[in-house]
Amino acid sequence: MTATSSETEQVRFWRGEFGDGYTDRNANTREQIEARVALWARITGRLDGAPPRSILEVGANIGNNLRALRQLTSAEFFAVEPNEKARQILIDDGVVGEKNLRSGFAAAIDLPDAAVDLAFTSGVLIHIHPDDLPASCAEIHRVTRRYIVCIEYFADKPEELTYRGHDERLFKRDFGAMWLDEHPDLQVVDYGFVWKRVTGLDNMTWWLFEKR
Ligand SMILES: C[S@@+](CC[C@H](N)C(=O)[O-])C[C@H]1O[C@@H](n2cnc3c(N)ncnc32)[C@H](O)[C@@H]1O
């Protein structure tokens, strides 16, 4: 880990009671996983002939993305998750092996440079304070050898929304543009929209980037 970022109020929020409650509410129903399999089939279908052998989810919670990805790939999984309750579920359910699970956060990932072929966030950058986004992206960029996937809420201009009664806990922006501005060595492989109306998932935009 090269990051010097210290733990923020935002990370403590997710480690604590709020994160526990979110984890309790989070469901890994068959419908939920099937919807994510369909999303990830679209994304992994664009990894032309170079399937990742290792995948890191930053902010995995109970691992719904990784559970879906397991149906599509035999890659080795890694996860970073600040919430202890969620980490225990990842271990108990065999989603990620204990040695590949980190208790850190996006701006301080305890993995070497280029440790994985693909690193991704899904509904995580939206919860990170804008001031901490550059350090978070730098860490994700550092630990991936080849691909970055970003699946987040989109807004043309940065905006803050109240999140379950809390201020400074939910932010939207054009995360794709942010990635390209922060890391010009990335090229867009593909991007798309997840439409709640037909998928049952939230309305989200996804981007697949490759390091040049
Ligand atoms: C809304 S949930 C999304 C979970 C999962 N990625 C998904 O798509 O279902 C956000 C997750 O990110 C974690 N998280 C919050 N802040 C984080 C940070 N700064 N770095 C890494 N993970 C974080 C939370 O503990 C929580 O598990």
Image (spheres, rainbow, N blue to C red):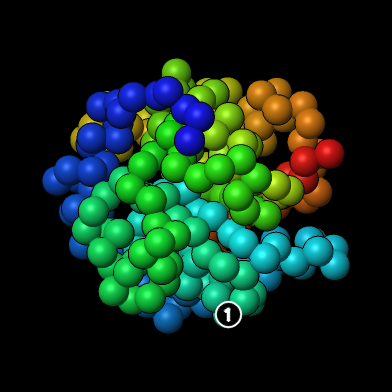
> What is the total number of numbered labels drawn onto the structure image?
1
| Looking at the image, residue 80 lies above or below residue 31 | above
Q: Is mark 1 on a helix, strand or loop?
A: loop
Examine the rendering and report whether any part of residue 160 can be seen.
no
Horizontal relation, residue 90 to residue 30: left or right: left
The picture quadrant where one finds residue 175 is top right
Q: Residue at x 23, y 43 (%)?
A: 15
The image position of residue 103, as x and y in percent, is 33, 48
The picture quadrant where one finds residue 13 is top left
Q: Which amino acid does label 1 sit on?
A: Gln
Examine the rendering and report whether any part of residue 4 can be seen.
yes
Return the residue nearer the eye: 161 or 191: 191
Q: Which residue is drawn at 26% across and 42% down?
A: 14
The C terminus lies in quadrant: top right
Horizontal relation, residue 148 to residue 22: left or right: right
Q: Residue at x 28, y 74 (%)?
A: 92
Q: Farthest residue to the top: give it.
A: 131
Horizontal relation, residue 28 to residue 143: left or right: left
| Looking at the image, residue 22 lies above or below residue 125 | below
The image position of residue 205, as x and y in percent, is 61, 47
Q: Name the residue under label 1.
A: 71
